[in-house]
Amino acid sequence: MTTNDGDSPAGYLDRWRLLNAWVTMYVVGADLFIMSPLLPSMANALHVNVDSAGWLVSGFSIAYAVASPLMGRVSDRYGRRRTICWGLLAFAAANLGTVCSSSFALALLSRIFAGISVSAISPSIYAAVGDAAPEGRRAHWISIAVSGLLTALWTSAPLGALLAHVMPWRAVFILLSAAAFALAWPNLRLWP
């Protein structure tokens, strides 16, 4: 149980946990929402039309939605931090798979794997935040973590449009992969 005293060691830990949860959910959300402006470049590189490339977003989203209840159960059984950490490592690998995709089919498989990976991260982060929150502050704490995902919703598409003009789309997925990999360690250390 943590305290409300912001100057205590527990208070510092609380801030780091919340910041970590926010950033983790932002990266998860950015991966999905940054895709739209990248689709024309991806479609061109993968030799499909933009409409077909839209399945890269749909495949991720469907896998995320379908696998989330199962991954929530995995988190309950094997622990939040393990599930988050393994989810982030798998997410990093999935994004590298997208980078290395030479065909639309491989890109679609990597995006489905990314969606499954994210389904391990999201419910586990929300549950870990709720578990670590001080009594009477669970909803407040969870709302901070959720705001990371919601901030990605409104910032990632414009960010993706900007990045599409300054770097190849594969470089964007390298950045997302690096961010996910870098977040695995703090998530392993910060959650009880």
Image (cartoon, grey):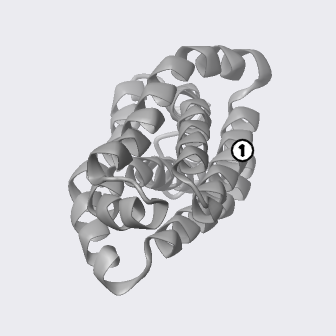
Label 1: few (<14), some or many (≥20) within 10 Å?
Answer: many
Quadrant in which residue 67 is drawn = top right
Residue 98 in the image: x percent, y percent?
A: 58, 57
**Which residue appears at 71% of the width and 50% of the height?**
89
Whether 17 is drawn above or below 182: the answer is above
Q: Is residue 134 visible?
A: no
Q: Position of residue 83 (x, y in %)?
A: 71, 33
Q: Which residue is mark 1?
A: 85
Quarter of the rendering occupied by the C terminus: top right
Q: Secondary structure at mark 1?
A: helix
Q: Give the camera-side residue of 40 and 137.
A: 40
Query: 151 left or right of 68?
Result: left
Residue 169 screen position, x and y as percent = 44, 71
Question: Is residue 37 visible in the rendered structure shown here?
Answer: yes
Q: Residue furthest bottom?
A: 166
Q: How many marks?
A: 1
Q: Is residue 177 left or right of residue 90?
A: left
From the top left corner, tell me how far across and down residue 59 is, in percent: 45, 34
- In which quadrant of the rendered image does the N terminus lie? top right
What residue is rendered at 49% in x and 29% in y?
A: 64
Task: Identify the residue at image location x=58%, y=26%.
Answer: 131
| For residue 183, above or below residue 158 | above
Kindly identify the amino acid type of the residue bearing the numbered disc 1.
Cys
Q: Residue 167 lies in what quarter of the image?
A: bottom left
Q: Tell me if 22 is positioned left or right of 85 in this view.
A: left
Residue 6 vs residue 143, the one in the foreground: 143
Q: Nearer the viewer, residue 18 or 26?
A: 26
